[in-house]
Image (cartoon, rainbow, N blue to C red):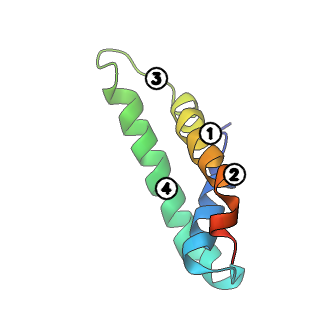
Amino acid sequence: MIPFLGLIVPNIVSIYLGDNLRKIIPPHTMFLGIVFLLVCDILGRVIIHPYEIPVNVTVAVIGSAIFLTMLLRGRAYAK
């Protein structure tokens, strides 16, 4: 189970591309989700080199920081 992936990625895409779900969900959200998960996996393998941090821990830490940022700046993102 990967936390915050389904919460963070669609909201980031909708902030930058709008709320037309038919247009943004298939290509942009899937691509950003793949890139976000890949970056978190690479960070989890590189931070403590001979050991690995599980990808769900890395996604949870980065995702919670992004979520709190989006939550605290909610008025700035409102259109």
Q: In this view, does 23 lie to the left or right of 34?
A: right
Q: Which residue lies furthest to the top in this view?
A: 50
Mark positioned earlier in the residue sequence (3 or 4): 4
**Quick one: SS at disc 4?**
helix
Horizontal and vertical percent for residue 15? 60, 71
What amino acid is found at the position of numbered circle 4 in the picture? Ile
Horizontal and vertical percent for residue 11? 65, 63
Q: Residue at x 64, y 73 (%)?
A: 25
Q: Which residue is under mark 1?
A: 64
Q: Which residue is drawn at 69% across and 78% down?
A: 79
What amino acid is found at the position of numbered circle 3 in the picture? Ile
**Quick one: SS at disc 2?**
helix
Q: Which residue is under mark 2?
A: 71
Q: Which residue is under mark 4?
A: 34
Q: State the CA–CA distance, disc 3 to disc 4.
A: 18 Å
The residue mark sitting in front, 1 or 3, is 1
Mark positioned earlier in the residue sequence (1 or 4): 4
Q: State the CA–CA distance, disc 3 to disc 2.
A: 27 Å
Residue 78 found in image quarter: bottom right
Residue 4 found in image quarter: top right
Q: Do the residues labelled 1 and 4 touch (CB within 8 Å)?
A: no
Q: Are marks 4 and 2 in contact (CB under 8 Å)?
A: no
What amino acid is found at the position of numbered circle 1 in the picture? Ser
Q: State the CA–CA distance, disc 2 to disc 1.
A: 10 Å
